[in-house]
Amino acid sequence: MNKEEVSLDNATKERFQKDQLRIESGLNSREEYAAEIAVPTSGRMNRYESSAPGSSVSDEEVAELVEAVTRNKAVGYVAFFVALASLFVWPVLLGVSGIILGVIAFVMGNKGLGSWSVALGIIAVAAYFLLMPYYS
């Protein structure tokens, strides 16, 4: 036997041992994989979950959730439009306002519009302070 055959033989033995361990431990089944990627559940209940397994969420709770999501989107859009307007009019005042509203929108969960608002606000304020000496 040459060296290559011995190393191949050892690699085959290792692979067989790993496969055997995987089969014996049950890691070869799809149920284990599904359990690993499933959302973990906690012991405490969510505010919008009911205690009975068959009951549904009340209309008031749904209306409250829809109102909260709509309010978060409204803050995000206002922040974006203020930051966009700061590129054209009153860059320092509207830019800082866009940054503050963008951070609020980001914290409230509207991460996309909040991030864009902060970025546009920073660009407007930085451009004002960088270009102002050339125009005065």
Image (cartoon, grey):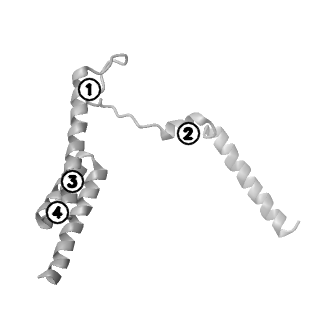
Mark 4 or 2, nearer chain start: 2
Q: Earlier in the sequence, mark 2 or mark 1?
A: 2
Name the residue type under label 3. Phe
The amino acid on which the numbered mark 2 sits, given as a three-letter code, is Tyr
Residue in view at x 13 percent, y 67 percent:
92
The residue under label 1 is: 62
Q: Of tags 2 and 1, which is closer to the observer?
A: 1
The reply to whether dot 1 and dot 4 touch (C-beta < 8 Å) is no
Q: CA distance from mark 1 to mark 4?
A: 36 Å
Q: Spatial distance from mark 3 to mark 2, Cα to Cα? A: 45 Å
Q: Which quarter of the rendered picture does the C terminus lie within? A: bottom left
| Percent x, y of residue 13 | 75, 53
**Amino acid under label 4?**
Gly
50, above or below 100, in the image: above
User: Which residue in the structure is indicated by mark 4?
Assistant: 95
- Disc 3 is placed on an element classified as helix
Left or right: 18 in relation to 133: right
